[in-house]
Image (cartoon, helix red, strand yellow):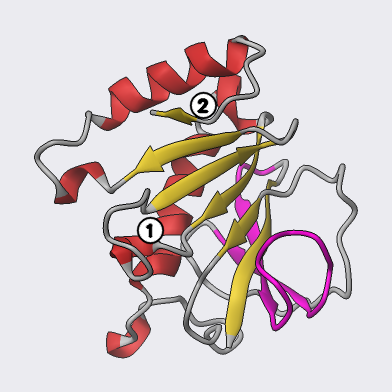
Amino acid sequence: MVRGVERITRGMDGSIRFAVTTGGDCDGTDNYGKYIPIDQDGVRLPEEYDQVEPDSGWMRILGIQGDPPQIGHPYGENGRRDDDALAAVRLAALLFSQDEIATRISGIDVTNYNGREDRFKTHIRLWTRDGRMVKWGLLSERRFFEPEVADKLRNLVLWLKRSSLRPTLI
């Protein structure tokens, strides 16, 4: 079982690479499991790493429920139920497209994606490189009461500029 996508980084050619970890805890306290990179389209790349340097620019994704796809194949292929992984990939690509945000976010947590653990708690959380938590919320296209993505991004930029250690709802 995939426990999470551990790192995401943007390559010099503009591509985004993610790494899925298998096994271990999703809380980011250890490097148990393999790092399995995927690209910005969710396609599994052939490399595997035992660890990735914390300052390498990769972004951690936690809480993916399904197994990783085969090398060269994307999440969601052939009817695979990879909604959490696909949502994380889309959100990571969006965050990496924002210069003021890309280098400040260290993780995307989809453990409670679609409220699978607790429908009343935040479905997607972000973690900053300085250890702060952001309650991203739901996917805006799925709920009428969620702020628009542009508003969330603007609020996130403003919040990141502050030094508050309190979690915030974006």
Residue 58 placement (x, y as % from top left): 73, 49
Please name the residue shown 42% across and 50% down the image: 124
Please name the residue shown 61% across and 76% down the image: 3
Residue in the foreground of this view, choosing between 127 and 88: 127
Residue 75 horizontal side relative to residue 114, left or right: right
Residue that carries the numbered disc 2 in the rendered image? 98
> Where 119 falls versus 116 (above or below)?
above
User: Magenta region: which residues?
Assistant: 13-39
For numbered disc 2, what is the local secondary structure? loop
Which numbered dot is residue 157?
none
Alpha carbons under labels 2 and 1: distance apart: 17 Å
Mark 2: amino acid: Gln
Please name the residue shown 65% across and 23% down the image: 165
> Where 3 falls versus 148 (above or below)?
below
Residue 27 is covered by the magenta coloring: yes
Residue in the foreground of this view, choosing between 22 and 163: 163
Q: Are marks 2 and 1 in contact (CB under 8 Å)?
A: no
Quarter of the picture containing the C terminus is top left
> Which residue is outermost to the left?
144
Residue 25 placement (x, y as % from top left): 70, 72
Residue 57 placement (x, y as % from top left): 77, 42
Determine crowd level at label 2: few under 14, some 14-19, many 20+ residues with C-alpha closer than 10 A.
few
For numbered disc 1, what is the local secondary structure? helix
> Where 50 falls versus 18 (above or below)?
below
Q: How many marks?
A: 2
Residue 143 placement (x, y as % from top left): 14, 46
User: In terms of sequence position, does the residue under pointer 2 or pointer 1 come before the other?
Assistant: 1
Residue that carries the numbered disc 1 in the rendered image? 87
Residue 138 horizontal side relative to residue 110, left or right: left
Mark 1: amino acid: Ala
Quarter of the picture containing the N terminus is bottom right
